[in-house]
């Protein structure tokens, strides 16, 4: 359940508390991506030390491996993974896009500016991609990325899957459309997503009394779709916002530029119930965080901070795009930590020179150390943002981060 | 400096203290392999928690990347890596074998039973391997495994390299022969190794007063060679043991079977000075550990425990060869830790089912968790072995471990 703490006077930005069965999240908050029940390269105990409040796992990937039955048998995601804090599971709706139209359109997360990703031409492989998804009114047929086997995801089936996984916040199955889909397709898909949302909500309520699931206090979020079309976003926010969900997510496509993404938020957020939390799927750039928070987003997740870490890119405030790449030869003999003002484990113990060495050598220990820094950086930024909202100094903080 | 604590009454086994500039090692002890200045998948602080006493890095690999100059600039290996405890560096002598005759003979570590490796036929690639090493009286010419560039290692140059790296215990350059080398070749190589040892010792003493090196209190170990030939091992132990080294290592080839390896130790150890420490290069199997300790070995290193961990194989006392593979489907829903009696981080926090999931998914976090268990297992075994020697119960302990 969401509890508003402070509403900013000059923008929809706000602080709040998101209460879950496994703890309370101070919002706005970054949600660390733990697709396969682990943040890549980190054990769950490290997340606690970093100050990560909440993680998001993925139903599609966990369904394929190890399977929701195994996780349910072991007591649900919390007991299975050892992460005891608040947890979300995405529904597979993003995979409808990334393994479906995204593959066929050759856009991946490209074509749009999906936050956290640079626009880039599709690779040869992406261009040749064939959809692994077939959609019908009933649901989505997926081919497994592991063994090609077929899997059917219905709105009701996904709720049961997520009930078995036992995350605190779960999402309905939706169709995440492609930025290359036209108005007519996007409208049709949105309307089906609305019908799916209703089915999911019914299923969620029907399964609520089943004591065999690991987490009786789950919260179901609806997802607003409608692409980058103003009237569709209005319609979707009204329809989904009118249903009895515990919270709401803004789904993609979010348009073809950051400006379009901002517009999508401007169109959508004001139509959602103020007393419920709002999640934005797929945000990671520092400037996107400010833009989203200013528009009233409470939580957001993105794989980019942990993914770029594994490639040597670490956050640093006073650098272009707030990042430096440790592979750079200028760090070869650099005894400084990544960031002198950072008190993460990595900055407390290791020099840029050593980290560069580990990165170039492809040592696994590097992935962990770089991931710790990037997550800690975001945790600290979100703390600062919450404090700024509380003290009415969000403008000042954002100015400090512009470069 | 080595200090004998207790000499076993029925065997050359002994406990002792190996004092270095960065702490004292209780022996017999396992030396964790940190080839490129990190134990794979572990940050150095984790080693301390596990109870690892000492690590061994590799001069050849660190020379190629990041280079000894960089490490010296940053204050030597200890400050560079953040591992503050006792550290060894191997000389590159093993690479003379592994990148040279080992490649040409198609044996890798095969043909012999190099401890920690199963005998197996050479792979196609190994068979086709061309030597990357040329040897002369002066030293060894290496081709870089990274970029093919040529590097010359002389006995004197390696001492300077190791002086710059600053490990506590350093090894002379030797020629590790192949188990397929004949008597004549092995004898010639051994004699050259003896000449190199003398040159290295001279260089070590000459550089002792140079205050620009990061660690003034290094200890130099000589290496006994001679293959699996009794008279050569006798000769080498006598010659090398007669030189003023701070300690001694037994180098390979150690023969073609475990029995031959045991013989090599039986021939060699009694001829080495009792008041100095003895290191065995490349031991990892539980039964090899007992065999080596019984023959008077104080320290030994092996990459196998950490390498097999990354492949899903973890130590477990009551299993064939004291190991289980977590990929096995019988662990799919297994809520138990790897070992209920183990108090390592991994066994305290995670189930076999979760670890199996991470392993099959290829998650980096698995490598760390499995490595922690395997190193902790060896640390505990060595504690037990030391306690058994102290209490005259080594036979009893070894019987418990036979299966």
Image (tube, coloured by chain):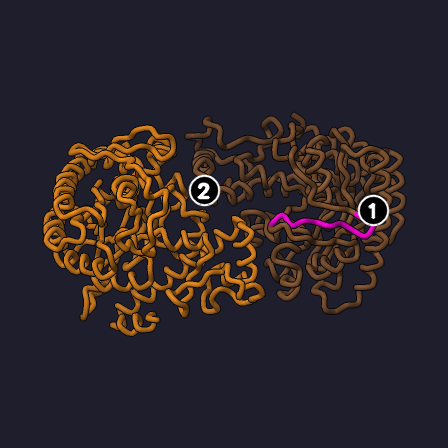
Chain colours: A orange, B brown
Give the residue at mark 1: B193
Q: Residues within 10 Å of mark 1 (few under 14, many from 20)?
A: many
Callout 1 touching callout 2 (CB < 8 Å) = no
What subunit carries mark 1?
Answer: B
Please tell me whether mark 2 sits on a helix, a strand or a loop: loop
Q: Earlier in the sequence, mark 1 or mark 2?
A: 1
B143 inside magenta stretch: yes
Decide which of B347, B282 is in the foreground and name it.
B282
Q: CA distance from mark 1 to mark 2?
A: 44 Å
Q: How many marks?
A: 2
Decide which of A226, B328 is in the foreground and name it.
A226
Residue A290 placed where, x, y %? Answer: 28, 64
B372 horizontally vs B30: left or right:
left
Residue A308 in view, yes or no: yes
- Which corner quadrant holds the C terminus of chain A? bottom left
State which mark lies toward you, 1 or 2: 1
x 53%, y 66%: residue: A330
A339 inside magenta stretch: no
Quadrant housing residue B259: top right
x 63%, y 47%: residue: B145
Residue B287 placed where, x, y %? Answer: 69, 32
Please tell me whether mark 1 sits on a helix, a strand or a loop: helix
From this view, report whether residue B194 is shown above or below residue B213. Answer: above
Q: Main secondary structure of the magenta part?
A: loop
Residue A164 placed where, x, y %? Answer: 29, 35
Quadrant housing residue B167: bottom right
What subunit carries mark 2?
Answer: B
Give the residue at mark 2: B363
Query: Magenta part of the protein: which range?
Result: B136-146
x 39%, y 46%: residue: A83
Residue B397 in view, yes or no: no
Decide which of A186, B167 is in the foreground and name it.
A186
């Amino acid at each position: 359940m969401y509890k508003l703490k402070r509403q900013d006077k000059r923008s929809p930005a706000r602080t709040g508390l998101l209460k879950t069965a496994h703890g309370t999240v101070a919002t706005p908050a970054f949600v660390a991506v733990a697709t396969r029940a682990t943040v890549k390269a980190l054990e769950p105990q490290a997340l606690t030390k970093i100050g990560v409040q909440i993680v998001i796992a993925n139903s599609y990937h966990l369904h394929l491996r190890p399977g929701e039955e195994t996780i349910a048998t072991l007591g649900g995601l919390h007991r299975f993974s050892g992460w005891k804090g608040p947890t979300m599971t995405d529904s597979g709706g993003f995979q409808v896009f990334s393994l479906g139209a995204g593959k066929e359109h050759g856009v991946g997360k490209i074509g749009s500016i999906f936050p956290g990703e640079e626009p880039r031409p599709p690779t040869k492989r992406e261009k040749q991609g064939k959809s692994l998804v077939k959609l019908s009114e009933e649901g989505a047929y997926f081919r497994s990325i592991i063994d090609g086997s077929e899997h059917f995801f219905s709105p009701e089936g996904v709720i049961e899957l997520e009930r078995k996984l036992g995350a605190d916040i779960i999402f309905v199955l939706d169709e995440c459309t492609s930025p290359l889909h036209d108005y007519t397709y996007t409208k049709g898909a949105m309307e089906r997503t609305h019908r799916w949302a209703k089915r999911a909500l019914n299923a969620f309520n029907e399964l609520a009394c089943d004591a065999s699931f690991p987490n009786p206090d789950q919260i179901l979020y609806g997802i607003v779709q409608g692409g980058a079309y103003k009237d569709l976003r209005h319609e979707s926010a009204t329809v989904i916002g009118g249903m009895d969900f515990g919270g709401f997510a803004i789904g993609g496509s979010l348009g073809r530029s950051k400006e379009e993404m901002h517009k999508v938020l401007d169109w959508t957020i004001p139509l959602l119930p103020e007393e419920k939390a709002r999640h934005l799927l797929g945000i990671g750039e520092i400037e996107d965080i400010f833009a989203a928070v200013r528009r009233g987003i409470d939580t957001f997740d993105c794989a980019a901070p942990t993914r770029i870490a594994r490639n040597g890119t670490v956050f640093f405030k006073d650098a272009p795009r707030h990042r430096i790449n440790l592979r750079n030869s200028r760090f070869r003999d650099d005894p400084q930590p990544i960031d002198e003002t950072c008190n993460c484990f990595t900055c407390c113990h290791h020099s840029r020179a050593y980290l560069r060495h580990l990165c170039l050598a492809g040592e696994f220990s590097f992935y962990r150390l770089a991931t710790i820094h990037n997550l800690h950086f975001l945790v600290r930024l979100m703390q600062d943002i919450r404090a700024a909202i509380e003290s009415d100094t969000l403008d000042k903080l954002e100015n400090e981060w512009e470069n």
